[in-house]
Image (cartoon, helix red, strand yellow):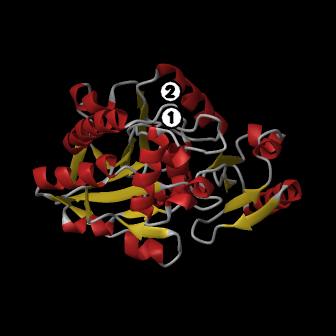
Amino acid sequence: MSSSLELFTSRVSQILKVDPNQIPELFTDRYSSVRLNNLKLNSGKKVNLATKLNSLGNLVPLDWCPDTYVIKSNKNLITGIEEFRNGYYYVQNASSLLPVLALNPKPEEVILDACAAPGGKTFHIADLTKNEAFIYVNDNDKFRLSILKKQAAVYGVNLVHSFSLAAQHISKHTVQTFDKILLDAPCSGEGIISFSSPTPLLYWNLNKIKSLAVLQKNILEDMYKLLNAGGTIVYSTCTLAPEENEYVVSEFLTNHPDTYLEDIYTPFKKFIPNITNGLEFWDNCIFNPTLTKALRVLPTDYMQPFFVAKIKKNK
């Protein structure tokens, strides 16, 4: 076993509290999910579309997210048909639905998706608010942002404005503030590592994790400047590293005593069995005790590891 593989396996087995021998089977290819797009479909069309998709692969409803299904077939089968090209549904991993559900967006709210590309969470926000929220998007990659904007038109999503800025510097370029901010932060992506790949850890190392944690802290600080009193930031990553999750949020809460975590673990746990709460400590560091209100997704055949915390700012 290589040193990096041994280190990754040791760390992740401690985080997930599983035997190290189980790690390879937990990090493999997963089934995709489809979220039907209510901005373009009425109830009758949704039934017909679900029937067609079921003919391409076994559809299993996700009871905790309306109009969403796990599709147990080859992803290419469901992305090669006209309905997909017309924006009738969006294909994503089921775990990535949770940050938007935690954000709980409402019509008339001013909302920022701070690291928005490729756009799935933005489009989910628009769907849940019936296109009646004021949605701003940012991504520092201009090419990815241009694709997002084109896809927004395909999915019938209305955007108020787009930025292409380093997320940690947005406040320097706008006076706009927001009721709710989704920060799906750039991360080491441990949740999407697949041992089916010949080089699963090609881009993984501890130095990368540490440098990303610094970036995440800086971005979260800028989100605080942009957030209205009484507002909400949902911070999420698709990684397991505590340095990028609990460390970041715990330090933020210490630096901003006018913020607190809202409990999302308890309500989600009622519907999703494969989640646990945030870690209380790691590597001799004890986190803010309210991190137990955050949630971690444990990997399954259709859900990748994810971390989600809901930060509230006092009125």
The C terminus, quarter of image? bottom left
Q: Secondary structure at mark 2?
A: helix
Q: Is residue 51 left or right of residue 298?
A: right
Q: Kindly check if marks 2 and 1 are in contact, taking CB atoms under 8 A apart as contact.
A: yes
Q: Is residue 43 above or below residue 74?
A: below
- Residue at numbered disc 2: 145
**Rendering quarter of residue 164:** top left
Q: Secondary structure at mark 1?
A: loop
Closer to us: 201 or 20: 20
Label 2, residues with CA under 10 Å away: few <14, some 14-19, many ≥20:
many
Residue 203: percent from the left, percent from the top?
A: 48, 31
- Amino acid at dot 1: Ala
Q: Is residue 222 above or below residue 304?
A: above
Residue 123: percent from the left, percent from the top?
A: 55, 45
Q: Is residue 136 left or right of residue 94?
A: left
Which residue is pictured at 39% across the width and 60% down the height? 15
Q: Is residue 214 above or below residue 16?
A: above
Which residue is pictured at 61% across the width and 45% down the height? 195
Disc on res. 209: none
Q: Which is more N-terminal, label 1 or label 2?
A: 1
- Residue at numbered disc 1: 117
Numbered-mark total: 2
Q: CA distance from mark 2 to mark 1?
A: 6 Å
Q: Is residue 294 visible?
A: yes
Closer to us: 17 or 157: 17
